[in-house]
Structure formats: C-alpha cells, structure tokens
Image (cartoon, rainbow, N blue to C red):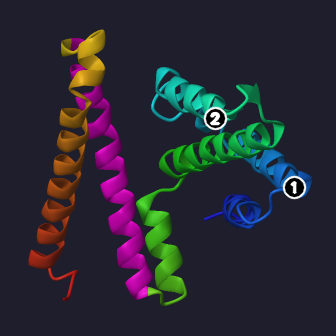
Amino acid sequence: MKFLEISAFLLFIISSFISNWIGYLMLLIIFLIVLFISKKSLRFMGGFKFWIFPAIFLFIMSFDFNTFGLSSEKLISNTNIFVHLYIFGVLINLINDTIKMKDLTIFFDRYRFYKLKFISLFTLSVMRRMSSDVSDVFYFYRRENSGFKFFKNIHMLVYVCVRNSVKISYDLVELLYTRGLYEK
C-alpha cells in the first residue's frame, strides 16, 4: 500500500469529525490525491442515476417545513453529508482499482498483522464480489420494473441484495474454513 492511499484514508477519517472549512479542505485534498493516483476512481459508485435519489432527498430535507423556506444550516449540513458519501464511494473505487490482494498480503505479513490480514482480505474479496453482483441484480431489476413498479417492488431489490451478500459471505467463510485459513 502506498503512502498517498493511506494518507487519503486517514484524511477521510479525520474530516468526518470536522464540519467546518478545514473538513472541506481535507475532502478537496482527498479528491486531488485520488485524481493523482487513479482518475478512473473518481466515477460515481453505482452510476450517476444512483446518486439522483440521495441528492434530491438531501435537498428536500433542507427545507423548513413550518415556513416552507430553505434552511441554509440544513443545506450546508446535507451538502456535507452528500460530499462525504461521494468521497467514500471514490475511496471504495480506489481500493477496488489500485490495491491488489498480493500487495496487501505482503504488507500484513511484513508487520505480522495476521488477524487483520484475514479480515482485510476477506472484506476486500467480499466487497469485489458483492459490487459486481449488486450491479447485475440492479440492472435486471431496472429492466423488469419500470415506472411506478420500480418503487412498489423496491423491498424485493433490498431483499435480494441482502440475501446475496449473506450468501457470498457464507460461501467465502466456508471456503476459508475448509482450507484451514479461518479458525473460530
């Protein structure tokens, strides 16, 4: 793992606790670091259409419903939430695009982080399988459920995604347990 990637993650964690202009400056630095490392990672996680609903939801939540006016404090807070969500998605894309399992294994073996090695490799492999699986499920769900039916049957989409995530995790734990890489 490289120094810039680690610094981007640390800046993101620190910026989560700071809600003034310094936090936004940290998010801008993270954005520039990711731009320097991998421009491909700046794509919207889940596609552009995925981000329309959170943006509209956070904008609507910025209104004061007593006076039907736009509250600037709520708008700034919701913008902060949306920017943090986007930067988190960018960091997930950066992990998927740049970090290789072999490099992560070498790093954890060098510093004798054996439990952390298992957890990190397991998480990375589950995340990669789940992201491709969820995108496939969402594609077919969108094809079959257009218009009002899309929102009417959204509980089925959530159910299928959760079920497939649990199945992927169970299959990987079973595989690692039979190979002797996982102890209870």
Task: Please state, as top left, top right, bottom left or bottom right, where the N terminus lies in the image.
Answer: bottom right
Q: What residue would you read off at disc 1?
A: 20
Q: What residue would you read off at disc 2?
A: 42
- The reply, left or right, for residue 141 in relation to residue 92 is left
**Mark 1 vs mark 2: in front:** 1
- When the figure is inspected, residue 51 is found, relative to residue 177, above or below; the finding is above
**Circle 2 residues within 10 Å: few <14, some 14–19, many ≥20:** some
Residue 167 percent across, percent down from the top left: 14, 55
Residue 173's image quarter? bottom left
Which span is picked out in magenta? Answer: 114-143
| SS of the residue under disc 1 | loop
| SS of the residue under disc 2 | helix
**Residue at image x 78%, y 35%?**
71
Q: Nearer the viewer, residue 119 or 1?
A: 119
- When the figure is inspected, residue 32 is found, relative to residue 21, above or below; the finding is above
Q: Which mark is residue 105?
A: none
**Cα distance between the residues tagged 1 and 2:** 23 Å
